[in-house]
Image: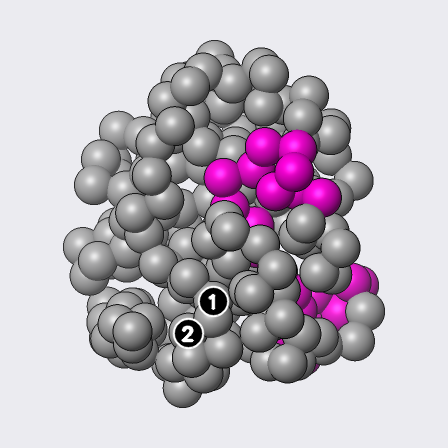
Amino acid sequence: MPAVDFRLYLVTDRHQTAGRPLLSVLREAVSAGVRAVQLRERDLPIRDLRVVAGELQTELRQAKLFINDRVDLALALSAHGVHLRESSLPVAVVRGLLQPSQLLGASVHSIEGALAAEQQGADFVVLGPIHDTPSKREYGAPLGLAALERAARSVRIPIFAIGGMTADRARDARQAGAFGVAVLSSILSAADVGQATTSLLSALEHE
């Protein structure tokens, strides 16, 4: 099983790039140190998603590419991994479909969800929302740092905190036990993508 060797997990949303092409924003982020990108354009038809995924594989060779939800596409492209929502195929089923070299991440919204994902074979979980953020309001009230700390004590696999993550909040999340953080707008919407990335990575160096 490959190791989870990144602490900053960048989730894509081409609607949050302040009008800039998604690929150009991602190039800046990867140049500044992002080493894992989750392609999450859920509103794209599969053919268009396949094109975007191929571009990211070609252009962002320094970063691991995870495909959100579409296990078929992750397998067809031999992507570094796949990321599942709680409403996706069961983690255990997908684990059996992936190659041993591919990582499996899962989004969860409770400590129980994190425990279940671990037991079924996830390599890491993304827990949230920890703080309020527009993109995660459909998943309920913010969980807060106390819940993150309990979850980090409950599972052995890496936990990435998501939801309103700034550099200061990323530092707090690490102190609460998170392995890293997952972000969208903190990088995608930043006026200076490189600086935003550098600030987050610096905050995540806490041990």
Q: From the image, tell me which residue sits under label 1.
A: 178
| Foreground pick, 41 / 131 | 131
Q: Is residue 175 above or below residue 63?
A: below
Identify residue type, mark 1: Ala
| Foreground pick, 27 / 166 | 166
Residue 128 lies, in percent from the top left, at 65, 65
- Locate residue 52 relative to residue 13 in the image: left or right: left
**Distance from label 2 to label 1 (Cα)?**
5 Å
- Locate residue 162 relative to residue 201 in the image: left or right: right
User: In the figure, residue 51 lies in which quadrant?
Assistant: top left
Q: Is residue 46 visible?
A: no
Q: From the image, tell me which residue sits under label 2.
A: 174
Query: Is residue 133 inside the magenta stretch?
Result: yes
Q: Is residue 23 above or below residue 139?
A: above
Identify residue type, mark 2: Arg
Circle 1 Cα neighbour tier, 10 Å, few/some/many (<14 / 14–19 / ≥20): many
Query: Is residue 13 inside the magenta stretch?
Result: no
Quadrant occupied by the N terminus: top left
Circles 2 and 1, Cβ within 8 Å, touching? The answer is: yes
User: In the figure, residue 175 lies in which quadrant?
Assistant: bottom left
Q: Residue at x 71, y 44 (%)?
A: 116
- What's the magenta region? 116-139
Residue 47 lies, in percent from the top left, at 57, 21
